[in-house]
Image: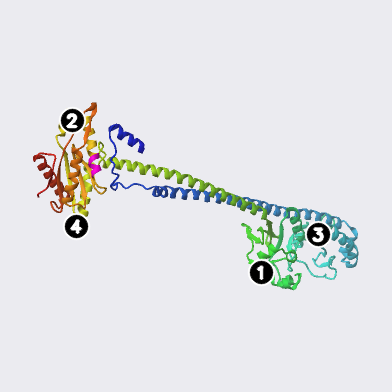
Amino acid sequence: MVNSFKALFRALNPDASMPANTQTIPSQVTGIQTAQLRWLFLGPVMVIIFIMIGTLIAAVYRHANDEISREVQMLHTSSNEVYQDNLEHLTGMLAGITGMMAQNAEMRSALAKKDRAKLSKSAAPIFATLQKEYEITHLYFIGADRRVLLRAHNPAHFGDVTNRVTTLDAQLTKAPAHGVELGPEGTLTLRFVSPLYNGEAKQHLIGFIELGVDTSHLLKDIQKSLGVQIFEFLSKEFLKREAWQQSMPDPASLTEWDRFPDVAPSAQSLKDMTPEMSVIMSNRIFPATESMMEVSQEKSDFRAISFPILDIEERKVGSIVMLVDVTSKVLNARNTLFLGLVLGITGGSLLFAFFWLLTGKVGQLIEQHQQAMHHLATRDGLTGLFNHITFYTMLEDEVARSQRSKAPVSLLMLDLDHFKGVNDKFGHVAGDMALRESGNIIHQQSRSIDKVCRYGGEEFAVILPETDTAGAMIIGERMRIAIEGHLFKLNEGHDLSITVSIGVASVPEHAASAQELVDSADQALYVAKVRGRNQLYRSRS
């Protein structure tokens, strides 16, 4: 753009040349500096870029966490389904076994006669087989009055009346009943109770056969099939503390009753305790069913979640806590997050560097364009000297400075003698050439602090800071002699000599303001022309 301004200048003024004097005046237009432009543009851009990078990284991290949560939730659902499926499978197995035992005539007879000796003799080998092959933990023979005749798993304990829900349901419905029941000592048992009757009409109840399976081994099946950690916690509402404490594996476990306000761990869970579950126990925050708890142990990461244990009456009698090892997935998520952060920072840095260079170039162009526009606004298009408007601006500034510093300032008003004849005789092109050369001569004879202006037409003005009238007369005379002695070579081989008349005035000697100074110098110029031209005249006002 700067080159285009120069090209325009030369096109309009093919013979013009810039004055040798490089003095400038401050721009009156406030330009946008490169640094300001950079930060005005890059500030919002970088904020947007960092927001985008942060949003992207957050989205990646959230997606990775969502994937972990979905997988844990799937395992949570699967473990619950496996638990329920195993209960149904065990129920079917217990139904088949009790059905076969109910067909045993010897057992039916002994139960009807309440013959404990015969029941024990018949049941002992059967229970041993069931315990070994099917992990059945309980075998009861109960009379029609619900009084226990024999516990094959604990023969010494008998004679008590059972009021368990399964037994009552079997008696009421005259059909087998089954369900999970929580014992006061903290054991969850799947019980299957089959009532025995004489005759198909089921009018005479002989008694009940009950089989039970401790459900703790179901948890081990879930652990093996899904590769998770499973722990059982029981509701204190349905436990007796003394009975629970008697089932604990060691005295140190007795304090675990107070670990959580509403639940206590089962004996089997305390036996199978892991470091990860110990962290949860130490924090005393029980995992919720609806949300996952993050658990970290050394360099491992786990997610904990629970699902309820319902008994035969659909009461929540406890919770199963599942711990899922997500270490590898968390590590992958962190690596993905780190990679995204590196890529984001790299991309942001490259964008920053690109826009930094771009705004730098744009800023330089703006500054160059501004300088060029400023030059066009303050300079005379023909001579390259300061123009009329700029002359008054600078003169007012110098007069004001003179009044502050009490230093004089002088003004030379120059007018080329008989210049109209030059235009009439040689043409305006030659006249313009003579004006340009005259301006250059005046400029060459001025000092670095002086300001040479084209006042208008063939008139020039020179502002002389810190110069009194005597000094101004010396400078003016030097300019007059230089112009008089210069041979102007015009087109078509014509040579021309030109003289100049000069008026001189100073502040504070002749004027107190810029306009008064111009008027005084102009009057002095008029006198110099009247007195014969080609001379200087100082103001007398």
Foreground pick, 131 / 6: 6
Q: Amino acid at mark 4?
A: Lys
**Secondary structure under the numbered disc 1 in the rendered image:** loop
Q: Amino acid at mark 1?
A: Arg
Q: Disc 3 and disc 1: Cα gap in Å?
A: 41 Å
38 relative position to 393: left or right = right
**Secondary structure under the numbered disc 4 in the rendered image:** loop
440 relative position to 206: left or right = left
Foreground pick, 199 / 94: 94
Residue 176 visible from this viewpoint: yes
Quarter assignment of residue 377: top left
Q: Disc 3 and disc 4: Cα gap in Å?
A: 128 Å
Question: Which residue does the numbered mark 1 point to in the structure image?
Answer: 259
Q: Which disc, if any, is residue 423?
A: 2
Instruction: State which tag comes first along the sequence, 3 or 4.
Output: 3
Labelled pair 4, 2 in contact (Cβ < 8 Å): no
Q: Disc 4 and disc 2: Cα gap in Å?
A: 43 Å
Question: Which residue does the numbered mark 4 point to in the structure image?
Answer: 406
Q: Position of residue 51 (x, y in %)?
A: 49, 50
Q: Residues within 10 Å of mark 4 (few under 14, many from 20)?
A: few
Q: Which disc, if any, is residue 195?
A: 3
Foreground pick, 346 / 295: 346
